[in-house]
Image: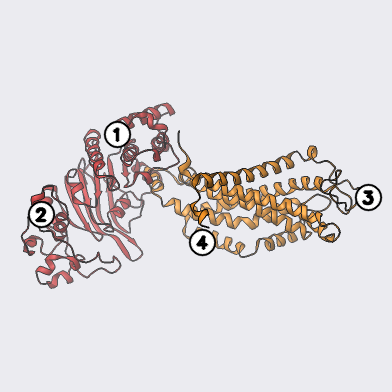
Amino acid sequence: MTDAILDIRNLTVRFGSIAAVNDVSLTLRRGETLGLVGESGSGKSTASRAILQINRASSGEVHFDGEELVGAKGARLKALRRRMQMVFQDPRSSLDPRMTVGALLEEPQVIFGIGTRVSRKARVAEMLHLVGLDPAVANRFPHEFSGGQAQRIAIARALILEPELIIADEPVSALDVSIQAQIINLLVKLRSQLNLSLLFIAHDLAVVRHISDRVAVMYLGRVVELADRDLLYGAPAHPYTRALLSAVPVPDPHIERQRQREILKGELPSPANLPSGCAFRSRCPLYAALGKPEICSEKLPPLAKVVPGQSAACHFAGETDKVAGPSA
Amino acid sequence: MASAITQSPARSKIYVNGLAVLGFGLLALLGICALFAPWIAPFDPNAQDYRAILQGPSAAHWLGTDHTGRDMLSRLIYGSRVALSIGFTAVGAAVLIGGIFGLVAGYARGIVDEAIMRVMDALLAFPSVLLALGIMAALGPGITTIIIAIAVAEVPMFARITRSQVLSVRERDFVVATQAIGAGPLRIIFRHIVPHITSPVVVMATIAVGHAILTEAALSFLGLGIQPPTASWGAMMRNGFAYMDRAPWLSAFTGLFILLTVLALNLAGDTLRDRLDPRGISSR
């Protein structure tokens, strides 16, 4: 029907008076990988849970392959859930510690009444093989595995029903750096093999770079920049994206030593008491460099196109170079 | 004190195992007594012998006789039947009913939770013996009433502990993950929540059996529980009480039986708590 597998429009999730996700609109095309980046508390996990209807949205719409998810219940929700799955941050807590790996992988098939006992077991073995594990591990318990192995199990569980969309909520943040690349490579391999669309959530830009086609950056519940990967990494339009990028170390000691970092001052404001206008202005180096223009405290900057393939929510999106100091 | 802290793990483990053996050993012994009372007891528990009234321990009557010449050991052995059956049935019923209330309240949350828990709080506000007394007074004495009375008094405790466990488990990632996979509430509750909350409930139940036995004894002591001539530890305590000056062993031996039973249940509860740690399970 459309080429958008996931279409999020003006999604807002409130907890009491706090909007954890505030007026977020994103589109994920079929086969595309969208990276979603932000600090803890920026609302990225809440957004992902609202997409899967684990947290209910306060307002807004989420369309999955053209079907409205918000408010979906019962059999219709169940049928839609089969087509989208989630991979969590910590595999050791997202796998029931009292179930064997085999039982964990069989469960989704049991829930949807797929196959016979024998065929389900065969499918489990097949999936374990696909994620690079020995099928003989099926009768072990999750706590007998390393973090990386456990995440492979969690991925196998998410993929066993052949979903079209995977939401990976910081799938590598809890893992050792040496294991992170393995898991990302596994996701890249499976993505093309199984023709998946992927919403990949992370808290730093370095992790997302390799895997994403486009990247969205969230700050305090709002998307502040959404751009094609190369545009975002090459010429970030929002001062927050710039600051995040400057926090990523460069793997060359000469450049790294001479590079001037943009370090954000101050703490993340309390979501219950956001600054007026642009929520980022309390920490924005551009706001300070431009002499605190009034518009920033008066008007919420909309997410607007800067160049084709790149939008940013900043009144001065084109002028990020005006921040003092030589940029890389 | 310092030596207790620096005690080697191996030694403390043996110590813990010793207590476990003691607890379960005593329980097994009591269980055998209760099951095989007719074969174990040396005398008919209700046979009166007016030639042997208020006798001290002797070769014929190991633990002496009461004011109608009944053999104390036989009565205590038969009494264990009453105590254990009341204890386990009452607590079993309380776990079942309280558990269901707790599961529903903890899973549904909101107004359902409020409604159930306020009723439970109201029940909890009464001291358990007082509540049981009221129920006994309303329904009349008898073994069924006493079981109902004790069960009703214990239900709120199990509802509370179950609810609190459900609330903490249902927020864990693996429950959310199972929800995301499309599992319905029944599967989530019985396959993913219940297995994680059984150990605290089982531990609590073991200790509650001891408490129930004490409550039964207290009610029978007050004359509201098991009616004579059925041998009940509480009623035997009361009988012995009247002859405290002439035959102190009547109350002493009965008290000792109650003490050992409750102690055994508490030790068993502690052991179960230590053993039911989920990290203990493994495929190997």
Q: State if disc 3 and disc 1 touch (CB < 8 Å).
A: no
Labels 2 and 4 within one chain: no
- Give the camera-side residue of A111 and B269: B269
User: Marks 4 and 3, Cα distance to the nearest angstrom?
Assistant: 60 Å
**Crowding at mark 4 (Cα within 10 Å: few <14, some 14-19, many 20+):** some
- Give the camera-side residue of A141 and A87: A141
Examine the rendered structure and indicate whether residue A291 appears above or below residue A77.
below
Earlier in the chain: of badge 4 and badge 3, it is 3
- Quadrant (top left/top right/bottom left/bottom right) for the C terminus of chain A: bottom left
State which chain is coloured orange.
Answer: B
The spot of residue A183 in percent (x, y) is 26, 40
Q: Amino acid at mark 3?
A: Tyr
Chain letter of the residue carrying label 4: B
> Which residue position holds label 4?
B114
Q: Amino acid at mark 1?
A: Val
Chain letter of the residue carrying label 2: A
User: Marks 2 and 3, Cα distance to the nearest angstrom?
Assistant: 104 Å
Chain letter of the residue carrying label 1: A
> Which residue position holds label 3?
B50
Labels 2 and 1 within one chain: yes
